[in-house]
Amino acid sequence: RQSTMIESKHGAIRPYFRWGTGVLALHSTLAFYPSLRASRPSYFATAPLRDIREWRDIDFPPSSAVSDAGLLPRRLGVFPFDLSDALVVGQSKDLHLYEPRFHQLFDAAMEDHAGMVGMGLIAPSGIVSTVPLAQIETYTRLEAGIFATIRVVGRCSIVDLLDNFGKDGVPRPYLLVECTERADRIEAADVEKMDLTADAIENGFLELSRLEHKLGRETGGDVEKRGPPSVDANEEYHAAKTLALEASEHEGFVVRGEGAWVAKEEGDTRRSLHTLTAISWAALSTSGGKCGDKLMALDCEDLLERLHMALGILKERKKEVVAKLALAGLSLEDNENEEEN
């Protein structure tokens, strides 16, 4: 694949993007609901898992005290990224690592942290405290460096920057932090509202897709002559949703109130909290998701609020398309001939 070299004071990283979308599993003093999805096949049991589950186990007990929220800090190596590179849970990125210090960070992640790394988002004032938590999915070592794919599977908050020396006393050329995972806080009374909001999001992407194709069909592209949409909005959303569901496989929730539920019972038409969370991330992972929106979503621990955020972004995208249709003198509804075609 072709990519453009990116040089910065944070180090030379050459990313080329592959978008996907997802969420996390967490200890809670109030309630903890493990994922109800199928676990890994047993033949994986003899090999290191190298994922978020193993990472939670290998670094216990931590060197620092338990956080105020009752969560255990764990160690994590952090790659530096610009704010514009922010990813939400479920999205992935391909990296070409060619600096020796990043090779050391990568090796430490594989050997000491179960293949988990943090995406340190660098702002003008310093590193953002909320860090996308990613696992290394695949990698290849070549003479030109290490080519790796990372996927975001959770979020964490930095609680401490560790000293700059390794186990052998040699200075460490990369950033190592202690962090605590973050999970959504959910009010049981909001479940119905969340399900209705998810309905609006899924119907909204279907409508957005229809309007974008109408715009391209009627104008031979859009009014700016950029051609028809290269990606169907509804298909892009559902692909992102599938990735989000996979990334949030080992997820837990902090649920307050009575009547809390996670998985659908027989005959229950409501979505599970797992699915609702995946929808919230998927809507932000499409081409309409902007950097600022992703940063706010990563810092948000209220699932209903994040669903509302995703719905608001979707409505803005729809308004843009409606304005272009109006500028081209087209109606919002399909006529009978278009429906027959």
Image (cartoon, rainbow, N blue to C red):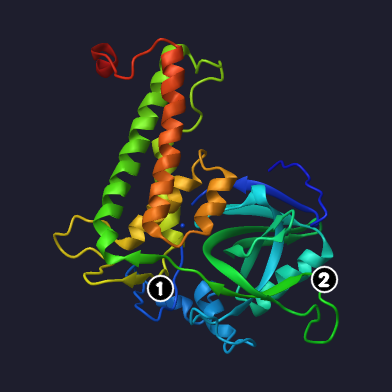
Q: Which residue, given by chain and number where applicable, does mark 1 sit on?
A: 41
Q: Is residue 208 left or right of residue 98?
A: left
| Neighbour tally class for label 2: few under 14, some 14-19, many 20 plus, Cα within 10 Å | some
Left or right relative to 168: residue 310 = left
Name the amino acid, label 1. Pro
Question: Which amino acid type corresponds to the residue marked 2 in the rendered image?
Answer: Pro
Q: Residue furthest top?
A: 329
**Snapshot quadrant of residue 140:** bottom right
Q: Earlier in the sequence, mark 2 or mark 1?
A: 1
| SS for dot 2 | loop
The percent position of residue 223, horizontal first and vertical second, equals: 51, 15
Labelled disc at residue 173 = 2
Residue 83: percent from left, percent from top: 66, 51
- Image spot of residue 36 (x, y percent): 32, 70
Q: Secondary structure at mark 1?
A: loop
The answer to whether marks 2 and 1 mark residues whose Cβ atoms lie closer than 8 Å is no
